[in-house]
Image (cartoon, rainbow, N blue to C red):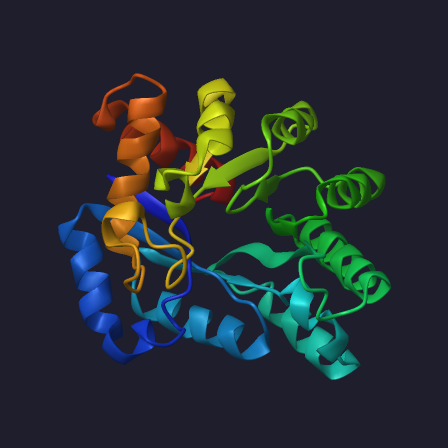
Amino acid sequence: MLIDTHCHIQFKPLVDEQEKVIERAKKANVKKLIVVGCDLKSSKEAINLAEKDNNIFATVGLHPQDSKTLTPEMWEDICELANHKKVVAIGETGLDYFKEYSPKDIQAQVFKRHIELAIKVDKPLIVHSREAGDDSLKILQELGAKNVVFHCFSSDLSFARKVWNAGYRTSFTGNITYPSAQNLSDTIKACPIDTIMIETDSPYLAPQRFRGQTNEPSYIVEVAKQIAEIKNMSFSEIANITTKNAEEFFGI
């Protein structure tokens, strides 16, 4: 069994054939999906999906690129949704300096509010960090965040070691299958096996075999295969380990 710990099947174009996407995932032995919210609308949609299927779970949060859009009313709604029984994490949240759609100081303020919320409701935190690794880690540690995963990890081994030393986890997606991803291969090779989780981040970042197509949860098989090859382990071993890690981390 596999678990896709981070997907956006409430986004286009996946939402247009959502039932088929879920069915294809089940046929690929992807038994559980965590549908991640990036704003109030997508967080509500994730919860609606989770309420209809025992094997789908939701998260709530505001993507750092949209930090400047946060209003008091929106935050009040996110905080209320955070207590829903099918919400298993807060996020995705964090810092994104790649294009800086929202000012860095606003991103930091909103990130801190998510961390505080995760601590308050005692749920894990899903961190989006792009070209902002050290700042993200500094804020997390200053606020005492405990259960944290850096999703779609794409930094180097040096930063990965800082993440692991802080007691946090790393999650890998389809970009590890790209020919140019030697830095990620090095990171995965060194990654403690009990910190690894896998995801698709669909509809983005389709694995090399499906590159150019819309990504979907069933394609997480390719991520598990690549990790198995890098770590010289069997596919079933990686499937079992990453599933166990995800179930423990998210409490599912």
Vertical relation: 77 (above or below) 231: below
Q: Is residue 38 left or right of residue 224?
A: right
Tell me if 210 is positioned left or right of 147 in this view. Answer: left
Residue 51 seen in this snapshot:
yes
Image quadrant where residue 103 sits: bottom right
Q: Of all residues shown, which one is farthest toward the left?
A: 27
Instruction: Give me the residue at 60% from left, 32% from top.
Output: 156
Q: Left or right of 32: which side holds 112?
A: right
Q: Is residue 190 above or below residue 241?
A: above
Q: Quadrant of residue 16?
A: bottom left
Quadrant for the C terminus, please: top left
Q: Quadrant of the N terminus?
A: top left
Q: In percent of the image, x 67 and y 58: which residue is there?
A: 98
> In the rendered picture of this protein, how many numbered marks are placed on residues?
0
Nearer to us in this view, 252 or 107: 107
Q: Identify the residue at image location x=45%, y=20%.
A: 189
Where's residue 87, x and y in %?
Answer: 51, 60
The residue positioned 65% from the left and 77% from the top of the image is 77
Identify which residue, 144 or 223, lies in the foreground.
Answer: 223
Residue 177: % across, % down: 35, 39
Q: Is residue 70 visible?
A: no
The quadrant in which residue 17 appears is bottom left
Between 183 and 220, the one nearer to me in the picture = 183
Q: Position of residue 209 (x, y in %)?
A: 23, 48
